[in-house]
Amino acid sequence: MTTQIRRFHHSALRAVFALLTLAMLVPGDAAAQRHGGHVHGRNDVEDEIHEEYRRTRWELGGGFSVLSPQGDFSGFVNDGFGVSLNATVGLEPTNALGMRFEAGYINYGSERFGVPVFPGTGRILADLTTRNNIGYVGLGPLIQIPTGPIRPYINGFVGVGYFFTESSIGGGYAYDYGGFGTTLNFDDASLAYGLGGGLSFRLSNGHSPVFLKVDGQYRRHGQTEYLTEGGIFDDGFGRAIVSPILSDVDFVLFNVGLSIGL
């Protein structure tokens, strides 16, 4: 396993280096000589596209996510679902090279059962819900084809994954009185890195163009402790016994959403 991890580390670093090298070669038009306010070798349509991207250097978006566990992680959890946010800023006039920030939340399992509100009777019940979640952030370079109705892109990133399980009570008696709040049962954090790519479909033009984004990324978090369904046991004496799992956490994250240029 250690040899495989090292090989992936080296592959990821080579891929990110290749991304940056390619980005240095993409905006070759920027080196073209200017004369009389016009860039030689480009027509008026290309100049118009160039100016459009100068106006939309920032791109903000969000959408829905699906987690597909890989490796050891897939032996303990099923698919998860969540939401994501992202922001990309162009690092040169055409936006062929950019920097992408992303953050998101994923729920990969939950359980719910009724518990008595008063110890002396089971006639009044409340719903006790336990959720297993992942929060994440990442930052890294992005390379894209910056023109056309369909624009492929690839990106690499490093970041942090936060794994946490929380329980809340509501429904029944608690529903009428606003619930009893939420308790954090267990959490752990680990460094993350990976590679991704996708397609951006232009839905509108203008000063604030809108894009449909479909992408995926492979995320690695290394050795991490986390809970799964059934990972908390009540001993009957008012104590909760927590049994975390320790394993490598790898998963593919699929995203579908919208973004707008600013």
Image (cartoon, rainbow, N blue to C red):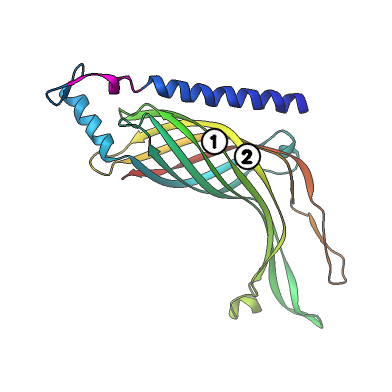
Q: What x and y, as percent, mark residue 159?
A: 58, 42
* Residue found at x 60% / y 36%: 193
| Up/down of 100 relative to 189, above or below | above
Residue in the foreground of this view, choosing between 240 and 109: 240
Q: Is residue 46 left or right of residue 192?
A: left
Q: Which residue is mark 1?
A: 157
- Name the quadrant containing residue 68: top right
* Residue found at x 28% / y 35%: 53
Q: CA distance from mark 1 to mark 2?
A: 8 Å
Residue 168's label in the rendered image is none
Q: What x and y, as percent, mark residue 45?
A: 18, 26
Residue 192's label in the rendered image is 2
Check disc 1 and give the amino acid type: Phe
Question: Is residue 7 within the magenta segment?
Answer: no
Q: Quadrant of the N terminus?
A: top right
* Residue found at x 78% / y 54%: 231
Check disc 2 and give the amino acid type: Ala
- Name the quadrant containing residue 128: bottom right
Q: What x and y, as percent, mark residue 38?
A: 15, 24
Do the numbered discs 1 and 2 sit on residues whose CB atoms are within 8 Å? yes
Q: Which residues are magenta?
A: 27-34
Residue in the foreground of this view, choosing between 183 and 64: 183
Q: Quadrant of the C terminus?
A: top left
Give the total number of marks visible in the rendering.
Answer: 2
